[in-house]
Image (tube, helix red, strand yellow):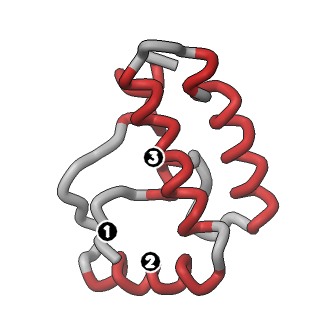
């Protein structure tokens, strides 16, 4: 599993967030960025795919443990960033 995103930031949750909080945040953000609401907007589609990817990892206990373990080895350093947690360009396209 490659760790190039901070999925907690993507979903706007704390690292100790419960599964219920993660699910609630995903659903809320997915409603904002769903491609059906933003046809012909590739940024919205990218944002939605990243939301799905983050939720897929953080909603599965095994994948989340593995993700957290890998993050601890990299000291939280990521190769690219996604401005969703700050309302950046990609999410603002939604």
- Which residue is painted at 64% across and 75% down in the image? 60
Residue at the disc numbered 1 = 3
Marker disc for residue 50: 3
Q: Residue at x 54, y 15 (%)?
A: 38
User: How far apart are labels 2 and 3 at the CA level?
Assistant: 15 Å
Circle 3: element type: helix
Where the N terminus falls, by quadrant?
A: bottom left
The numbered mark, 1 or 3, whose residue comes first in the sequence reads: 1
Q: Is residue 34 left or right of residue 45?
A: right
Q: Is residue 90 visible?
A: yes
Which residue is found at the position 76% from the left and 56% from the top?
21
Q: Which element carries disc 2, helix, strand or loop?
A: helix
**Cβ atoms under marks 1 and 2 closer than 8 Å:** yes
Asked whether disc 2 touches disc 3, contact meaning CB atoms under 8 Å apart, the reply is: no
Disc ID at residue 67: 2
Q: Quick one: 63 or 22, which is closer to the camera?
A: 63
Considering only order in the chain, which callout, 2 or 1, is on the residue closer to the N terminus? 1
- Asked which quadrant contains residue 40, the reply is top left
Question: As displayed, is residue 67 above or below residue 69?
Answer: above
Q: Quadrant of residue 64?
A: bottom right
* Mark 3 crowdedness (10 Å alpha carbons): few <14, some 14-19, many ≥20: some
| Residue 41 placement, left or right of 14 | left
């Amino acid at each position: 599993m490659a760790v190039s995103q901070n999925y907690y930031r993507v979903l706007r949750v704390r690292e100790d967030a419960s599964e219920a909080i993660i699910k609630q945040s995903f659903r809320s953000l997915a409603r904002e960025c769903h491609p059906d609401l933003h046809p012909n907007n590739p940024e919205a589609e990218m944002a939605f795919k990243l939301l799905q990817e983050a939720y897929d990892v953080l909603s599965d206990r095994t994948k989340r443990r593995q993700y957290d373990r890998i993050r601890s080895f990299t000291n939280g350093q990521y190769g690219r960033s996604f401005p969703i947690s700050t309302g950046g360009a990609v999410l603002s396209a939604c």
